Amino acid sequence: MKNNEFLWGGSIAAHQCEGAWDKDGKGVAIMDLVTQGTYETPREICQTIESGKYYPSHEGIDFYHRYKEDIALFAEMGFKALRISIDWSRIYPKGDEQEPNQLGIQFYQNVVEELLNNNIEPIVTLYHFEMPVHLVREYGSWTNPKVIDFYLNYCKTMFEALKGKVRYWVTFNEMNHIDPQTEASDIFTYIIAGLKYTEMENKKQTLATISYNMTLASVKAVKLARLVDPTNQVGCVFGLTPAYPLNCDPQNVMNSLKETDREFYQIDAMCMGKFPEYKLKEYQVQGIDLKVSKEDQLAFKDGKLDFIGLNYYSSSVAHYEGDENNEETLFGGVQNPYLEQSKWGWAIDPTGLRYLLNYVYRRYGLPIIITENGLGAVDQMNSDGVVEDDYRIEYVQKHLEQMEKAIVEDYVECFGYLMWGPIDLVSATTGEMKKRYGFIYVDKNDDQTGTLTRSKKKSFDWYQEIIKNNPTFT
Ligand code: BGP
């Protein structure tokens, strides 16, 4: 990447912050039908909007109306970049229309303009769990290749609408959680593809098809982006969790390698110019029917990524066969006795970030941007109305130290760090507000009280200093 300066900033997603879920012609997206949950209780997925239930995406933090105020705060912190997502259902309310919704396009043009006026580089994700519900009901979501065409049509609309303004595009967020090899939770498959795992008939076949079609959609979108504007830089974002071996028993080391690699076949397909043979063989053995056509082969060749986005929150420890006493963790595997966990059970492992950066860079040799990283925590205001979030500062500081080591000592080409949720927003997995990540506090509570007023936490000034003092790494 030819940036003179390191892309410091943050990442947000439409359905977690915008609100205005039915304003200005927006259609119903899959996340608009998901209620709030908690750590213990999964979010409920509804068929229709039922009164008496609370759907967090409906109000979000009202970024839709307050984006100028929020961008001003990001600019004050010194952000060089902000990753936003476009809600597909604002642009094509049902997903299969001929003509886009101009008011939806206008909103994102306004946001991008505001960012550019504040010298903040927009990094735009085209799919961060925001699919029009109609595409799920009428076409069966990503199981149907027609949805690839609708997606590409939507992408083209946005590439053209933001041409010359947006340089960095992201085709998908975290499609790697769709994995035919493992059991999934309803909420994970629903978030990504609008389908409940338990209701899938032939689970492995369905997941493999969804995953393949999304991967194909991504490489086709890369090519399209370059056709519209050859200066476009296109990446895809993956949420990766390195799996460590429990000990040096070679079998455990092997298990951990397999566990880590499980999430890489889509990246292989997007970076190596072909859908990996090893995956097709695996599918064959498992009775999964998947054919790569001649046309698809060309698409994989033509649509290699320019950069890789990494979302990193945690490492895990691969399953140890024969030891059933170890407690399962959210990321699978067993708990790591060397690491502390967040309140939501995510192991905190700064070194894992350096490990992952090395692993990914050595495998693909492509520039990397850290597109998400951060600590979900319960914040309390002190008597002066300030959140003294030293725990957050410590978390980010330690991860930044490891990132710096990866860049300076290991020569990994990492061109930016985007903290997840620099302003408090709705949690994707639980739908809670109390799981806060931000440097900016938003006065909103899980019982829906609060004025939505924004205020700076202690970490706000700290991140501002970090950005000021580290324009680049060499
Ligand atoms: C990632 C998602 C984000 C974000 C983050 C934190 O997987 O890309 O959308 O939400 O996880 O997760 P949560 O909000 O559940 O704490």
Image (spheres, rainbow, N blue to C red):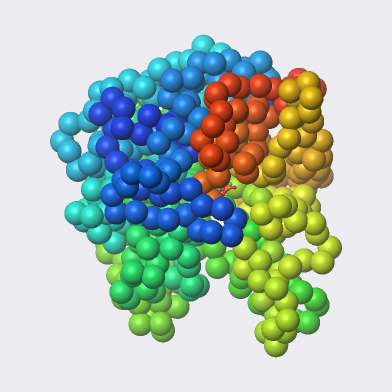
Residue 250: give x, y in percent of width and height: 75, 81
Q: Determine whether 35 is above or below 61 in the image.
A: below
Q: Is residue 214 left or right of residue 234?
A: left
- Image position, residue 17 (x, y; %): 49, 33
Task: Examine the image and state in which quarter residue 240 appears.
Answer: bottom right
Residues 36 and 225: in front is 36
Quarter of the image for residue 417 reads top right
Question: Which quarter of the rendering shows the N terminus?
Answer: top right
Looking at the image, residue 286 lies above or below residue 472: below
Left or right, 135 with respect to 127, comes to left
The extreme front residue here reads 52
Q: Is residue 79 left or right of residue 431?
A: right
Residue pictured at 51% horizontal, 35% vertical:
448
Q: Nearer the viewer, residue 96 or 236?
A: 96
Q: Return the residue nearer the eye: 106 or 329.
A: 329
Q: Which quarter of the rendered picture does the C terminus lie within?
A: top right
Q: Is residue 167 visible?
A: no
